[in-house]
Image (tube, rainbow, N blue to C red):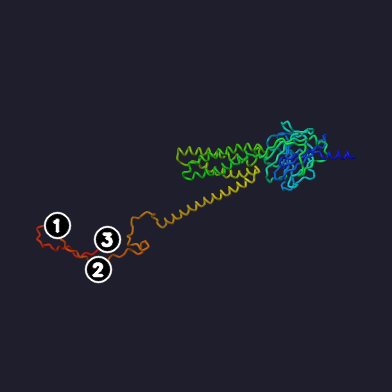
Amino acid sequence: MLTICITAAAAAARQSTFLSPSRDLAFALSVPETGNTDLFFSIRASVEHAWAAVGLGSDDMKGALFLIVYRNKKRDNVTLSPRLAYGNYEPEHYPDLQYEILPGSGIVDDHMVVNVRCIQHCRSWPAADSNSGYMDVSSPTEKAIYALGPRTGFGSDSPAADLQIHREFGVFNIDVKSTLGATDPPVLTADSVAEGTELDYRNTGTRDSRSGLHGTFMVFSVVFLMPVGAALRKLGRWARFHILCQLVAVVIMLAGVATGVLASLRYQRSRYFRSTHQILGFVVVGFVLIQVALGFFHRQKTIKTHAPTQYGKYHRFLGGIIVVFGTLNAFFGFDFALDYKIGYILCSLVIVFVFVSLFLYLGRQGIREKYQRRAAASAARNPLGSAPTGYQPQPWRENEHGSSPTEDAPPSYESHASQSIGLQPMPSPWRSSDVKDGGDDHPALGGAQQPREFA
């Protein structure tokens, strides 16, 4: 009887346990029997990570069966997502896996815990053209993969939810053979230790540089450089940099398109280029190329005719559409990449930029209208303009405030006896030498003169 009890206890305790170096993820596995397809496994991971996963049957993503766990939408329970990987990109949901969630699953001590009894398709699965697609339950060194998602507050009820790229992953060996004959599922706690597993290698600090470069290039070119280039046209001597600025923006935008295409191949949601962000992005890029052609034709014709063209009109109109829809698509892009924080930052910057631009524009318009009102008022007071009329009043006709008096011209001078001027006789310079002295001592020069006003 004692031997039977010890044997039963040993069978119940059979499990292989793996702990990541940071202890943020723990995985335990046991195989109840070899005659059926059942499999027991448990995953315990910190809620600081968006998701945690273990891949069975391969030391590479291609051909592995991934068991992924993340919180539900309300963040009070967990969601198990079985997936298959056919390359180094996001695995796709595998709905054919049949399993049963066991007691003890949920959010426990700030950890996502899922205890599962896998019923079918757990030991073999479709592997496409890979050499994997199965797990050898008799192997003492079966290859497996682990991965941890980014530190974001992710949650979803869908087993096919879109995921961001992992920030840590590694490969380990697991002794499956020693777990054969287990009667109970494995148990994981905060005090669990590694048993029957060995870490092969670990990679940390993984970032999706392609998506980051794509977002940087597109925002800098479409949201910033293109509006700046359009504004240079109306800044006098800076207008000659308009073409250079726009060409640089187009080159950077094309680099953003290339990195965006490469980034899209990593995720299930973007591999087939059917999302709103991608479709609208290709439309905006097409508009940019058309605008460049219109600008070229406009310049060639303007050089010959020195007159505005229809090409220029459509060129400017299309530029406004590009900036508006390009900025709108930037928000779609950050939402599509599940990078909401940067999207909110961009939204704030765009709002600030728009308000500052409106403030400067309206302020400039207000100053211009103010000068126009002053000019109109000045023209109303002086219909002939501000040029001199040819007549300037004499200083003595101005009042003490410097303006002409309202009354008519002053009256002419009155004739008074006291105003008479007596002229003394003078010898005539034309007097003939024949005239005797004293003959013309008092020539008649006329009567006393009165002063006259000179007009």
Task: Name the quadrant of the N terminus.
Answer: top right
Residue 321 visible at all? no
In the picture, the disc for residue 454 is 3
Q: Which residue is mark 2?
A: 416
Residue 259: percent from the left, percent from the top?
61, 37
Task: Name the quadrant of the C terminus.
Answer: bottom left
Disc 2 versus disc 3: distance between alpha carbons?
18 Å
Q: Disc 3 vs disc 1: Cβ atoms closer than 8 Å? A: no
Residue 92: percent from the left, percent from the top?
71, 38
Point out the residue furthest to the right here: 1
Mark 2 closeness class: few <14, some 14–19, many ≥20 residues within 10 Å: few
What type is the residue that disc 1 sits on?
A: Trp
SS at mark 1 in the image? loop
Residue 43: percent from the left, percent from the top?
75, 41
Quadrant of the rendered structure where residue 80 is? top right
> Image check: 397 left or right of 112?
left
**Which of 277/357 is in front?**
357
Q: Earlier in the sequence, mark 1 or mark 2?
A: 2
Q: Earlier in the sequence, mark 3 or mark 1?
A: 1
In the picture, the disc for residue 151 is none
Mark 3 closeness class: few <14, some 14–19, many ≥20 residues within 10 Å: few
Residue 322: percent from the left, percent from the top?
56, 43
Q: Nearer the viewer, mark 3 or mark 1?
A: 1
What type is the residue that disc 2 sits on?
A: His
Q: Disc 2 vs disc 3: Cβ atoms closer than 8 Å? A: no
SS at mark 3 in the image? loop
Q: Disc 1 vs disc 2: Cβ atoms closer than 8 Å? A: no
In the picture, the disc for residue 430 is 1
> Image check: 398 left or right of 290?
left
What type is the residue that disc 3 sits on?
A: Phe
SS at mark 2 in the image? loop
